[in-house]
Image (cartoon, helix red, strand yellow):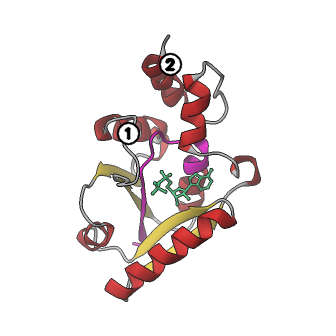
Amino acid sequence: MKTAVYPGTFDPVTNGHIDIIERALKLFDKLYILVGENPQKAATFSSEERVYMLKEALKKHNNRVEVEHFGELLLNYVKKKKSNVIIRGLRAISDFEFEFQRAQFNREFAKDIETIFIMTKDDYAFLSSSIIKEIAMFGGSVKGFVPQIVEKKLRDKFRR
Ligand code: ADP
């Protein structure tokens, strides 16, 4: 069985993430989605909320995806799941530098683990969790850019 790990902060999950997941499911039998922490920024949603939104949004794939929070090093999680592939999405050249460093770092410490990049779908090239939060915070509509459960959670969180 071919498996891969897709790590991210998913604060919250957007349709850009879902698109990467669905395309990765064409290449792999099973995806482990790791909800992690980004030390650079405090999360808006708790890890439980982030896991819940992903699980709800991915219900139709529930036999092929596993979503969980993991607070340790990504490489430890990949080994724990006995996988050897990390999936990342690329939106723009600005993502490249960061992702390149990460992939190099991971290869240095685990030579048998490969990082595979999936290029964003054009429609989602500008889409990020931060932009979604900004729109929602100021009362704008995020319809079509996030799963329905996320729309609802954003309304609850930023209700004014
Ligand atoms: P991180 O904080 O680890 O970058 P994110 O949750 O922001 O976590 O993103 C997880 C992964 O999904 C990253 O590889 C990111 O580049 C990718 N990604 C995020 N948004 C999009 C999008 N709109 N299209 C394609 N890939 C995306």
Query: Is disc 1 in contact with disc 2, using a CB cutoff of under 8 Å?
Result: no
Using the image, determine if residue 91 lies above or below residue 117: above
Looking at the rendered image, the quarter that the N terminus falls into is bottom left
Write the residue at 63% across / 28% down. Answer: 142
Secondary structure under tag 1 reads: helix
Secondary structure under tag 2 reads: helix
* Quadrant hosting ligand 1: bottom right
Residue 115: x %, y % from top left = 48, 76
Residue 117: x %, y % from top left = 58, 70
Please identify the residue farthest to the front as the structure is shown.
40
Extent of the magenta region: 1-18
Within 10 Å of disc 2 (Cα), the crowding (few <14, some 14-19, many 20+) is some
**Amino acid type of the residue that numbered disc 1 sits on in the rendered structure:** Arg
Write the residue at 31% across / 72% down. Answer: 75
Residue at which label 1 appears? 50
Marking on residue 155: 2
Instruction: Please check the rendered image and state whether residue 121 is part of the magenta-colored stretch, yes or no.
Output: no
Write the residue at 26% across / 55% down. Answer: 70
Using the image, determine if residue 145 lies above or below residue 86: above
Write the residue at 24% across / 61% down. Answer: 72
| 160 with respect to 109 (left or right) | right
Using the image, determine if residue 17 lies above or below residue 142: below
| 40 with respect to 101 (left or right) | left
**Amino acid type of the residue that numbered disc 2 sits on in the rendered structure:** Arg
